[in-house]
């Protein structure tokens, strides 16, 4: 009888211990579930915050890109024109101090000023240069260069070996146009060139070549690369940006009697083949 009572007591104790273990397990499981819920909530909040931050980041990036593009267009399309206006007005002033009146230079400054106003209007409408869009790269480059160099150098010559029927990609035209415009403005401001020769041609390796040859002070490739790595000027950054966009390269050369800058732009093989057949 005592044995039965001891067995019963043991069973009761074991049952109590089991119940206690179950209770502890339930409490621990409950705590774990609560912690999981807390972590899930934290993760959800973090995910929502991350998505919100990503949305904000996209908005900020878009705004930054828009500001950069507007700044780039202002620099390309308006800044260059205003620099030439300044040059023309300075020319009028210098001649005026000698008792001379240069109506041609004054009219040129007026025309550039009006064009800068027109360009500002185009920028607000997010348009690419109207003349480039309508008449193509060859005509747009020749017109732009003739306008910029009038009265400022002794001689400017433009030559194109491209077939006028060829339609270049819009991005290639746009970026080559603005790179050439920037390079030409820099030449007029810094090189003291008197003779400038601009040429468009095809290379044997399926590339569009835009050459700027002049008799002023030039850069070597090594000097350009040093400036590219050390300078943060907007003009240079702008050229590098545009070269990257179209996968182009720029080459600087200094020779005995002239210096030359060449923009090398890869062109689609179909365009190259069509051009070759008609030359």
Image (cartoon, rainbow, N blue to C red):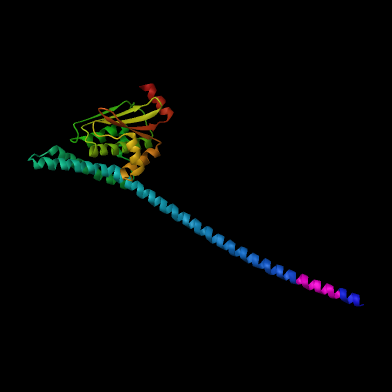
Q: Is residue 122 in view from this perspective?
A: no
User: Where does residue 256 sit, x and y in percent of width and height?
Assistant: 26, 27
- Establish if 36 lies above or below 266: below
Residue 254, compared with residue 1, is above or below; it is above
Residue 206 to residue 15: above or below: above
Q: Quadrant of residue 84?
A: top left
Q: Position of residue 113 (x, y in %)?
A: 21, 44
Picture coordinates of residue 155, whole percent (x, y): 20, 30
Residue 38: in magenta span:
no
Q: Is residue 59 left or right of residue 10?
A: left
The quadrant the N terminus occupies is bottom right
Residue 214, percent from left and from top:
25, 31
At a point 44% along the width and 54% down the height, the residue shown is 57
Residue 120 visible (yes or no): yes
User: What is the chief secondary structure element of the magenta stretch?
Assistant: helix
**Looking at the image, which is closer to me, 269 or 199?**
199
Give the residue drawn at x 43%, y 28%. 269
Quarter assignment of residue 112: top left
What residue is at 55 percent from the left and 60 percent from the top?
44
Instruction: Tell me the quarter of the image containing the C terminus.
Output: top left
Q: How many marks?
A: 0
Range of residues picked out in magenta: 8-19
Q: Quadrant of residue 174?
A: top left
């Amino acid at each position: 009888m005592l044995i039965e009572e001891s067995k019963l007591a043991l069973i009761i104790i074991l049952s109590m211990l089991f119940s206690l273990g179950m209770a502890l397990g339930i409490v621990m499981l409950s705590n774990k579930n609560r912690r999981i819920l807390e972590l899930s909530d934290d993760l959800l909040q973090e995910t929502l915050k991350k998505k919100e931050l990503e949305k904000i980041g996209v908005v900020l990036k878009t705004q930054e890109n828009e500001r950069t593009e507007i700044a780039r267009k202002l620099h390309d399309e308006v800044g260059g024109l205003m620099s030439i206006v300044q040059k023309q007005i300075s020319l009028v002033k210098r001649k005026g101090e000698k008792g001379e009146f240069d109506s041609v230079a004054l009219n040129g400054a007026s025309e550039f000023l009006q064009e800068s106003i027109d360009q500002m209007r185009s920028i607000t409408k997010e348009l690419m240069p109207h003349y480039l869009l309508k008449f193509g790269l060859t005509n747009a480059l020749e017109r732009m260069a003739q306008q910029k160099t009038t009265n400022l150098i002794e001689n400017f010559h433009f030559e194109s070996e491209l077939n006028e029927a060829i339609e270049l990609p819009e991005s290639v035209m746009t970026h080559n146009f603005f790179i050439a415009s920037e390079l030409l403005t820099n030449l007029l401001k810094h090189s003291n060139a008197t003779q400038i020769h601009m040429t468009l041609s095809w290379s044997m390796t399926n590339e569009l070549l835009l050459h700027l040859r002049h008799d002023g002070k030039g850069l070597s490739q090594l000097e350009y690369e040093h400036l590219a790595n050390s300078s943060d000027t907007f003009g240079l950054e702008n050229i590098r940006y545009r070269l990257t966009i179209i996968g182009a390269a720029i080459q600087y050369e200094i020779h005995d009697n002239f210096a030359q800058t060449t923009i090398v732009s890869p062109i689609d093989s179909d365009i190259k083949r069509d051009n070759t057949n008609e030359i």
